[in-house]
Image: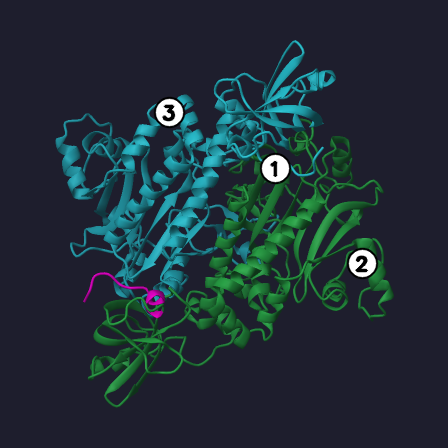
Chain colours: A cyan, B green
């Protein structure tokens, strides 16, 4: 057998007509009829599998080991396929099984529930569904890096272990090396000599880096210890957080819109096999939804206008709509799905329901915040212009009970070379749910972390 | 003043001759002479600063606020510069200070020690040194993604919070939401219902993904709670871990060599300003070192041959050289700096000093492991072919005291669709030390984490 193997992706592109090649991968399906057998083999290089024909009784003593899930190497000749639905197939001349899967293999040919597949996280990437999801995840992640790099942003790694509590939300995991914790005094003996947590956002450190480098973004894991078992929450998820010096809220609306549209367009162009699979098996109408989003400008309304619209619309909401209260999922969905029929930026939220670092407007009731709401999924991006006035920021921190001494470095950014700046955060998994139609966020990350799930 | 600003990078490329542009950034230096003043302004778009000429007494009432570190917006005309060392300068016509820095600004014109700068992590990115380091860090990180994406690798996010202990080393941070821990029984009430830690490697999960997707890599944070205060250790660092199905150790040597050479070549081509700065102020001879590495094949020797060389060389080592003992830093340096004079792969280490998952050779004394040693920095990559025989792996796990029940999923990869596979791990910060010459690893990551440092 040859030393070098050939990616199935290239074979299906027609680059190897009549050539003898070696392929390596896993059996997706196996069927035999008389003196010939057919294997669909997948090597991960593309979503599609390659049909292999075992003629002349080749490997017929191995048929028992050739079931779904077996790993093998096959050498053969690439020929135009007479079968429907495929252009190329491999006429095998040599075959080597590196590992059969056997009758106990949990992924037999039949379809499995997503719940069941979650219980075998080490094997589910071998199914069509998760193969498509994780290939999409990788493509989108690369596309995000390309997007920012091409626009002069620096990828900055902000710390994962932190002594800050960015949102003041208290939903943080503790990080410790202490075998026992009997009082808060113990943390003086801990690895960092003080309490330490997993970050909920890289924004604050990102601001420090943006003042020096102009345009930066983070792309890394973030953590919430929220005890919620929903299809939209993970304890560990990946965030993208751009931060731009000399920028205001309008700049962030423009950036976020251009960013989302660019990613959707690239996915439409480069992930056709995966999208077709999702359209057929996961979300009917997915392609149309994505095409629509990639064409039209997003709507932009203030929170106050949104409240007025919701109050007048005559809809029977479960939660009351009242200026000063946070918008609930049902309100957000009504706004973008029913009222606007497209993605909507809601801006200028009441100061009391948003974070301390958002810039207070002249009305002193609202902050220059924005949420991007997408039809079918709700909030996907949250951002703001940052409060750049030292005295106002300090007062807001005190109001929110933030320790100004521990956060003096953050205040100092407003004392030395202060500048208007703004940024936003995007949850990668929410975006992937939107792009794939997958209903449960635990199905768009390889190894989901949630309460009692690890 | 114009709405849109222009990146200084583009101005210095000569794209705006005689145009009126606006620039935004921080003052690096300010000097005045009679009725004219000069500002060197940096906006992060490039390592270089732009000289701005304030003629006709423009802003002379603001001179006090124009010291190093002030943030400002300037409009003016781009003209060919009569001064040496620069091609273009800006003749300012309008000036707005968004934030002065004042006399208390910690980064005045004089040079500061790296130790001092570590104590002001939020401001040190504004210095030339850290501007160069973090720009290099971003470039290299992007180049790493490009390298793997172009070769058909998928970027996979393996979990950060884990119940595995990959290396069996016990140097892991605990992750918990318990306010008090008085006994190990408490972990039943913890967020995940069992003990959880920060990952030391994404390899094991990466193996599961490689069996399905063929070629994957991770690029994410990893953690060691090792209590070592050295210039080569961090508690939180970023790792790149490719994992390849149907691959053996030789494939990994080829991949690692091609990868390192590719990154070095790209840095030489695209980071000239930064490298020139490092050459002048950080490591004399850096450019020559990198050019040499990018040209010549790396050496490859077995551990047994390395031991023989070291025993015969006549060098007076602090630690004895003995087959079965780990190579010390002094031995590694001798091998690549003195004996070979270039990067060296050492392969086939004694089984007893390497991890349980490495493939046992037929001699049953060595495993198919490799370390890549670089002159001046030592080990930068560690990898291996993985043990793919179920019974051998199980025995090794038992020998190493690994809980086979908790790790049954990992063993199952050898039961279902087993295949030879291999991978390696690279520490991003070690690579950046090598590329920049920076002596302390805490100076190549924006916010370093180490014992009692957070």
Q: Residue at x 57, y 70 (%)?
A: B287
Up-down relation of residue A248 to residue A38 (above or below): below
What residue did someone put label 2 on? B306
Residue closer to the observer: A353 or A89: A89
Where does the N terminus of chain B fall, quadrant-wise?
bottom left
Q: Which mark is residue A283?
A: 3
Q: Which residues are magenta?
A: B1-12
Q: Is residue B17 left or right of residue B231?
A: left
Same chain shared by disc 3 and disc 2: no
Q: Label 3 near label 1: C-beta < 8 Å? A: no
Q: Residues within 10 Å of mark 2 (few under 14, many from 20)?
A: many
Label disc, if present, on residue B185 of the rendered structure: 1
Q: Is residue B339 left or right of residue A148?
A: right
Whole-Å distance between the Cαs marked 3 and 2? Answer: 59 Å
- Disc 3 crowd rating (10 Å Cα; few below 14, some 14-19, many 20+) is some
Where residue B69 sits in the image (x, y, percent)? 35, 73
Q: Tag 1's secondary structure?
A: helix
SS class of the residue under badge 2?
A: helix
The residue shown at (72%, 45%) is B355
- Asked whether residue B99 appears in the rendered view, the answer is yes
Mark in front: 1 vs 3 = 3
What x and y, as percent, mark residue A31?
61, 14
Decide: is A60 above or below B347.
Answer: above
Chain letter for the residue marked with disc 1 in the picture = B
Chain letter, disc 2 residue: B
Is B392 inside the magenta-drawn segment?
A: no
């Amino acid at each position: 057998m040859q030393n070098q193997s050939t990616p199935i992706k290239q074979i299906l592109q027609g680059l190897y007509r009549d050539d003898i090649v070696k392929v390596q991968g896993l059996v997706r399906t196996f069927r035999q009829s008389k003196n010939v057998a057919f294997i669909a083999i997948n090597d991960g290089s593309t979503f599609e599998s390659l049909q292999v024909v075992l003629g002349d009784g080749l490997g017929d003593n191995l048929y028992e080991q050739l079931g779904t899930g077996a790993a093998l190497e096959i050498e053969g000749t690439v020929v135009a396929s007479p079968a429907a639905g495929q252009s190329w197939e491999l006429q095998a001349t040599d075959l080597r099984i590196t590992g059969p899967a056997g009758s106990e293999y949990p992924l037999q040919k039949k379809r499995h529930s997503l719940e069941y597949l979650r219980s075998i996280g080490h094997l589910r990437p071998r199914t069509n569904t998760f193969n498509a999801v994780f290939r999409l995840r990788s493509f989108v992640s690369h596309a995000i890096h390309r997007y920012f790099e091409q626009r002069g942003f620096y990828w900055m790694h902000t710390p994962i272990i932190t002594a800050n509590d960015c949102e003041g939300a208290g939903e943080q995991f503790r990080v410790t090396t202490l075998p026992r914790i009997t009082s808060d005094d113990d943390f003086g003996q801990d690895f960092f000599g003080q309490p330490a947590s997993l970050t909920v956002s890289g924004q604050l450190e990102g601001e420090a880096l943006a003042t020096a480098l102009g345009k930066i973004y983070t792309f890394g894991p973030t953590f919430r210890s929220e005890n919620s078992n929903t299809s939209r929450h993970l304890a560990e998820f990946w965030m993208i957080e751009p931060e731009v010096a000399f920028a205001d809220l309008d700049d962030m609306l423009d950036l976020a819109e251009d960013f989302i549209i660019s990613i959707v367009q690239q996915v439409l162009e480069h992930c056709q096999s995966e999208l077709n699979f999702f359209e057929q098996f996961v979300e009917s109408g997915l392609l149309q939804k994505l095409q629509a989003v990639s064409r039209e400008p997003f709507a932009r309304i203030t929170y106050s206008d949104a409240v007025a619209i919701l109050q007048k619309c005559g809809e029977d909401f479960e939660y009351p709509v009242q200026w000063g209260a946070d918008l609930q999922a049902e309100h957000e969905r009504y706004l973008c799905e029913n009222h606007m029929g497209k993605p909507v930026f809601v801006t200028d939220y009441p100061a009391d329901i948003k974070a301390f670092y958002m810039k207070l407007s002249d009305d002193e009731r609202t902050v220059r915040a924005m949420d991007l709401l997408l039809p079918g999924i709700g909030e996907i991006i949250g951002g703001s212009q940052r409060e750049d006035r030292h005295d106002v920021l300090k007062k807001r921190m005190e109001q929110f009970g933030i320790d100004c001494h521990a956060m003096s470095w953050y205040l100092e950014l407003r004392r030395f070379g202060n500048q208007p700046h703004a940024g936003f955060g995007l949850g990668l998994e929410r975006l992937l749910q939107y792009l794939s139609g997958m209903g449960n966020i635990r199905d768009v990350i390889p190894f989901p972390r949630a309460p009692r799930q690890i």
